[in-house]
Image: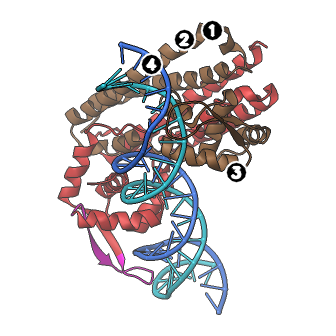
Chain colours: A brown, B red, C blue, D cyan
DNA sequence: AATGGCATGTAATGTGTTACATGATTCG
DNA sequence: CGAATCATGTAACACATTACATGCCATT
């Protein structure tokens, strides 16, 4: 049995063999927009995956007091990953602290509500700009339009991020309008 | 120190006094679209909130082997909640298994990709319909347009859900198009 | 009288974060 | 030679889910 984190690691290893350190870097930077993990979680998970014959490692030369391990995905790992891709989705447990705040918006006065909303808008604007910069980089490269290229998949997740932030921004406008004109 | 779950409970108790059982029901049904918790997490959290003087309980008559407790928010709890509302947001750790799958979409053939995408679209469509039904109910009631009413805040979170699902659906179309016309 | 919902709690386990620990290599 | 980065691991703690445990009350 492979955990969701396990599939995240397999997905990255399907793109390129990596050290645990590499994976931690990617999961804490690039991929962090829809999944994240610290190295303290990654190293044990790699060991588990190796016990299940989903990955294997070879020791390479490198820094550090311990041997540096280069992990690669096995055929069994690749099979497990592609099976999972089209399997029934785990019901995603949404945990959205922003919406949790909004659900108590009725408690505060108009000024505080506007302040909260401005914060949401600001962060959404920044995030959107970031995604757009990334997307522009991908669009400059031809692989991004080849469905069998990793760049294609990354570009697709970026597009989802862009559209999601755009939707949130128009929602901010909608709510602002309703706050200003609202009764009482 | 109050946890995010603590604020979720305070937010519900600010709307109406409830038993832990009530809160569990709401958190597992209505509120589950942006937060969730089981009763095994809620009962200890209520005890913690009571130790911090954020809620208090009175024993009421009811079913069960143990005394039934009706919790209500205290002034201190209300203050903590409204302070949190406009405080710096915790950087939300996104965990989106769907996008994680999409990021490995390049591994599978066009048929499997289409299948995955159809699943995403189907679930999004269902969710959108559900949100719209809820929203229509709120729109029939006048309190939903009063910013100081709980219904206003709930209606706002519903709108965010609606727009987010709409954005995901147009993203599905975008990706489908790209998959069909894509190179290689 | 049986079933289902109300109602509260604990235990065990799984998942994720923070902190502790170590030291080699590379670049300035 | 000093600082930053590479690199791997464990320990302690926090947060969350599943399973265990109990038994009253209302409806059929």
Image check: B129 left or right of A38? right
Find residue B117 and report its image quarter.
Answer: top right
Q: Which residues are magenta?
A: B53-68
Q: What residue sits right under mark 2 in the picture? A: A137
Query: Residue under mark 4: which chain is it in?
Result: A
On screen, C14 above or below A75? below
**Residue at x-position 50% and y-position 38%:** A36
Query: Does the residue at mark 1 contact the one at mark 2 (Cβ under 8 Å)?
Result: yes
First in sequence: mark 4 vs mark 3: 3
Residue B67 forms part of the magenta stretch? yes
Subunit bearing disc 3: A
Q: Say which quadrant the N terminus of chain B sits in.
A: bottom left
Q: Secondary structure at mark 3?
A: helix
> Mark 4 highlights which residue?
A130
Marks 4 and 3 close (CB-CB < 8 Å): no
Q: Where residue A124 appears, x then y in whole percent?
A: 40, 25
Q: Earlier in the sequence, mark 4 or mark 2?
A: 4
Q: In this rendering, do the residues under marks 1 and 2 share a single chain? A: yes
Contact check, label 1 and label 3, Cβ < 8 Å: no
* Same-subunit check for callouts 4 and 2: yes
In the image: residue A108, left or right of residue A9 = left
Q: Which mark is residue A141?
A: 1
Q: Few, some or many C-alpha atoms within 10 Å of disc 2 (few <14, some 14-19, many ≥20)?
A: few
SS for callout 4: helix
Q: Is residue A130 above or below residue B85?
A: above
Find the distance from the CA under tag 4 to the CA under tag 3: 39 Å
Badge 1 or badge 3: first in the primary sequence: 3
Residue A51's disc number:
3
């Amino acid at each position: 049995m492979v955990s969701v984190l396990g599939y995240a690691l397999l997905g990255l290893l399907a793109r390129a063999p990596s050290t645990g350190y590499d994976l931690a870097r990617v999961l804490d930077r690039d991929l962090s927009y829809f999944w994240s993990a610290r190295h303290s979680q990654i190293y044990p998970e790699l060991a588990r995956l190796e016990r299940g014959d989903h990955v294997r490692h070879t020791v390479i030369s490198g820094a550090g007091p311990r041997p540096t391990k280069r992990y690669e995905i096995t055929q069994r790992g690749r099979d497990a990953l592609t099976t999972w891709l089209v399997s029934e989705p785990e019901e995603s447990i949404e945990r959205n602290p922003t919406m949790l705040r909004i659900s108590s918006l009725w408690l505060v006065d108009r000024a505080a509500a506007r302040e909260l909303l401005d914060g949401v808008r600001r962060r959404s604007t920044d995030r959107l700009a970031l995604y757009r910069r990334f997307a522009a980089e991908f669009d400059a490269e031809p692989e991004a339009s080849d469905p069998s290229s990793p760049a294609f998949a990354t570009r697709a997740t970026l597009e989802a991020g862009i559209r999601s932030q755009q939707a949130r921004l128009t929602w901010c406008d909608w709510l602002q309008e309703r706050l200003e004109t609202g009764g009482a």
